[in-house]
Amino acid sequence: MNIQDVQTCGFFTLFANGKFIGKVKNTWVDEGLTYLIGALDSGRFTQETNMYLALHSGATAPVVGWTASSYPTVAAENQDTDIGYTGNRPLWTPDAAANNIIDSANTPSRFPLVSTSGTVTFTGLALLSRDLRGGTQGKLISAANFTTPLTFPDGTNFDVGWGGSLAAA
């Protein structure tokens, strides 16, 4: 049997008030890769209904051992609606997968940022299967930290697309 190596690549595409501000590579965590492989076994596998994006402010770099249950604490997920964003984790809405890629850069998820202190700072983000901020259920697919923390003024619309690809190595 010939087993081929597979490369994963994941990235977040970032926009502030409609303007492209950068792309960030992310770490696919073991829980996310196991979920992806498990999706092939529909008879014994429970499919998650949706995926959601989350913002965090911790300094710890993502590692493959992170899970949905550890993410809110180790990453310091933003759960503050006075200095953070309004609502739950926003829904990830990708375009149809094609050529080994799935991406939502054309339909990014919106974080309506709020800050009673004038600005809000984030160090990274993640893709998870549940919408509850600070929730520990579901699956963590991937996470990333920005090269440097991003600070935004109150009222900014921070839009984020997530994309991923698989390729034979």
Image: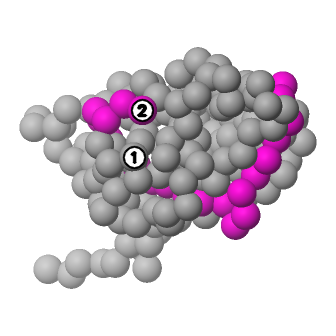
- Checking the image for residue 134, the label placed there is 2
Left/right placement of residue 139 relative to residue 150 reads left
Magenta stretch prevailing secondary structure? strand
The residue that appears at 54% across and 54% down in the rendered structure is 58
Residue 155 covered by magenta stretch: yes
User: In the rendered view, would you say 100 is above or below 86?
Assistant: below
List the single residue furthest toward the front: 117
Q: Earlier in the sequence, mark 2 or mark 1?
A: 1
User: In the rendered view, would you say 32 is above or below 54?
Assistant: below
Q: Quadrant of the N terminus?
A: bottom left
Q: Which residues are magenta?
A: 134-156
Residue 67 covered by magenta stretch: no
The residue that appears at 16% across and 37% down in the rendered structure is 45
Front residue of 75/160: it is 75
Quadrant hosting residue 119: top right
For label 1, count other residues whose C-alpha is less than 10 Å away and answer few (under 14), some (14-19) or many (20+).
Answer: some
The residue that appears at 66% across and 42% down in the rendered structure is 161
Residue 40: image location, x then y, percent: 23, 46
- Secondary element at tag 2: loop
List the single residue furthest toward the top: 87
Residue 123: image location, x then y, percent: 64, 54
- Secondary element at tag 1: helix
Q: Amino acid at mark 2?
A: Gly
- Checking the image for residue 73, the label placed there is 1
Front residue of 37/134: it is 134
Residue 92: image location, x then y, percent: 55, 32
Q: Give the CA distance from mark 2 to mark 1.
A: 8 Å
